[in-house]
Amino acid sequence: MHFNLGFSTVQVLWTLTFASLLVLLVVLLGRDRARRYPLFTASIVMAGLRLLASRLLFERLAPMTLTAIFLSLADLAVIISLLVVVEMARCAFPGAPRRAWFVGAVAVVALAAAVVGVWGPWPDWKTLIAGSTLAMLRLMQLVAQKLELLNDLLAAELCLLVILLGRRFKAGWRSHTQQIVIGLSTIGITEVAMRAIWQAIATHSVPKTRIEYEHIMGIQEKLYNANNVIYLLVLVWWIVCLWIDEPGTHSHSETAAELPSEVTGSPEN
């Protein structure tokens, strides 16, 4: 028997992703991980806000207003994401010498910036500073796209450094810092790969009929859904990993249970 519940793939992924974001926030706050990773927690809040706004505001506001809101949220989200990379780097290499920090940061940023600089065509600068509302929206979109690509590349580079050097600085396997960085890099690598695939398709495919156009749009939708599935899996990974304590640590409840009754203040029998 076949049941048609009337839910599309996009709707199912939206629901599962939003629920996973809420569960992850509960884990971050309930397991006291938010105090250690405040910017990462803020990025999860922003992801949930953007997801909720996409559902509540879509087709309910004027197109220009809606675009301005979404692009503003996108710019703010990517700035927070860049700060998350910095936060993860500080947590992964807390005892690194200042000179090594500076040299490593310059090398990592320079490599990622070089890739961003040569990736894809750049719009004419005059069209971005024309002074009109449309030009401002185009500039906001360009900032969001380029900074998102930069953030994806930085996350991948940081993950490689953490895997190679993290054990020396207490960021080895099963540490929350490394697990978060692995998730960030997985999202980043997936987005870069999807962007590269779609750019290749859009560049070399020129639809001549409506059927060919719909076929290309169908490929874009599948790439978008695949990207969302990876993001959902990363959220589940974070939920599981951040719920479990790091090796050698104990939760607050376990610590309190191990303390003597004189310290905890519990009455003796």
Image: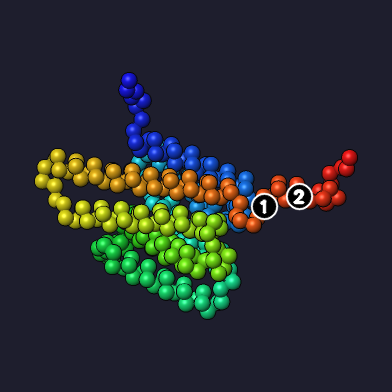
| Residue type indicated by callout 1 | His
Element type at mark 2:
helix
Which quadrant would residue 95 be assigned to in this image? bottom right
Picture quarter with the N terminus: top left
The residue carrying mark 2 is: 258
Image position of 238 (left or right of 216): right
Q: Residues within 10 Å of mark 1 (few under 14, many from 20)?
A: few
For residue 72, say whether it is visible: no
Picture quadrant of residue 138: bottom left
- Residue 221 % position (x, y): 28, 43
Q: Which of 28 and 143 lies nearest the eye of the viewer?
A: 28
Name which residue lies at 41% across and 70% down.
109
The residue that appears at 52% across and 59% down in the rendered structure is 173
Front residue of this view, candidates 245 and 139: 245
* Residue at the image position 32 percent from the left and 67 percent from the top: 115
Q: Position of residue 61 (x, y in %)?
A: 38, 39
Give the x, y percent position of residue 66. Answer: 37, 44
Q: Can you identify the residue that label 1 sits on?
A: 250
